[in-house]
Amino acid sequence: MSTQHTAPTAPTAQATAAATRIQQHRSYLMCRPEHFVVSYTINPWMEPAKPTDTAKALAQWQVLHDTYVALGHDVHLIDPIPGLPDMVYTANGGFVIDGLAYGAKFRFAERAPEGPAFMEWFRDNGFEVAEPVEVNEGEGDFLLVGDTILAGTGFRSTGDSHRELGEVFGKEVVSLTLTDPRFYHLDTAISVLDPVEGPGGVERANIAYLPAAFDARSRGILAERFPDAILVADSDGAVFGLNSASDGLNVLISPRATGFEAQLRERGYHPVLVDLSELLLGGGGIKCCTLELRRGQEENR
Ligand SMILES: CN(C)C(=N)NCCC[C@H](N)C(=O)O
């Protein structure tokens, strides 16, 4: 992996000047890891020979859940289905903007039945649904930043799904290519930090990212679009530091991402440390266990 782009940079004057952070209310979908186990390998983190501890996964997940609730966010739950151990990673279950849910179509057969299960939940809970034709893994690969969707490809979601995504939501979609198999979903390499919308419309939209996870074209796009982004070091990326959830002020991150924690503090964010080491055995972290439910303009404020 190239080290050229991985050194944390000092924030520009513009970035530090904008250090008053605004917390926004969030609504999330989560799934209790009742059936969590690593019984197959579909990413480099998964080693079925290593024992997993479902009780520990449940306890760590509960801390994440309770942290969201304590911060004032709404958490909805989808029932876990026996035999679908990866269902805990709800970020992959779809992508939701303004009450419209674009469904997931999973790359691997092991997760395929999750697609219809999430679609059923969306329908039963008042969301409009758009059935996917193309292979895509939901918010694992699609991130809303301001009014633009950053979309990852290279390992899971296809380029064709990026086109479909643009047609479904009528928004600009920026395709980014991931190149390191450890960072196989976009939410392992980019964290969206700032509020998407405020009373005056789109306010600030900043991100943190791991440059080494992308090809040169994608690094160029990110550098041009996000000159004030936090560039995260390889060591923080390697512990899934970027797989985090921000409400604009509080940023839930892995306690192992100590460099990223310091960078967030410098910029005026409030890092909240949540350890999901057991769920990392399945190749997922905080963001993976969290699907944002954007019901409409009102609820985003
Ligand atoms: C941050 N990531 C990677 C996610 N958005 N989801 C985790 C999915 C883990 C699952 N075993 C898989 O390989 O699909």
Image (cartoon, grey):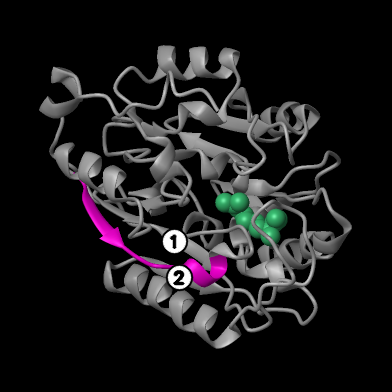
Residue 203, given in percent of the width and then of the height, sits at: 29, 30
- Above or below for 253 versus 47: above
Q: Which mark is residue 75?
A: 2
Which residue carries the number 1 mark?
A: 27
Determine if residue 117 is in view. yes
Residue 4, given in percent of the width and then of the height, sits at: 43, 18
Q: Secondary structure at mark 2?
A: strand
* Alpha carbon distance from label 2 to label 1: 6 Å
Q: Nearer the viewer, residue 147 or 4?
A: 4
> Is residue 291 shown left or right of residue 104?
left
Q: What amino acid type should be assigned to the residue bearing mark 2? A: Val
Q: Secondary structure at mark 1?
A: strand
> Is residue 198 shown left or right of residue 161?
left
Which residue is painted at 40% across and 71% down in the image?
64
Determine if residue 100 is in view. no
Q: Are marks 2 and 1 in contact (CB under 8 Å)?
A: yes
Q: Which residues are magenta?
A: 269-279
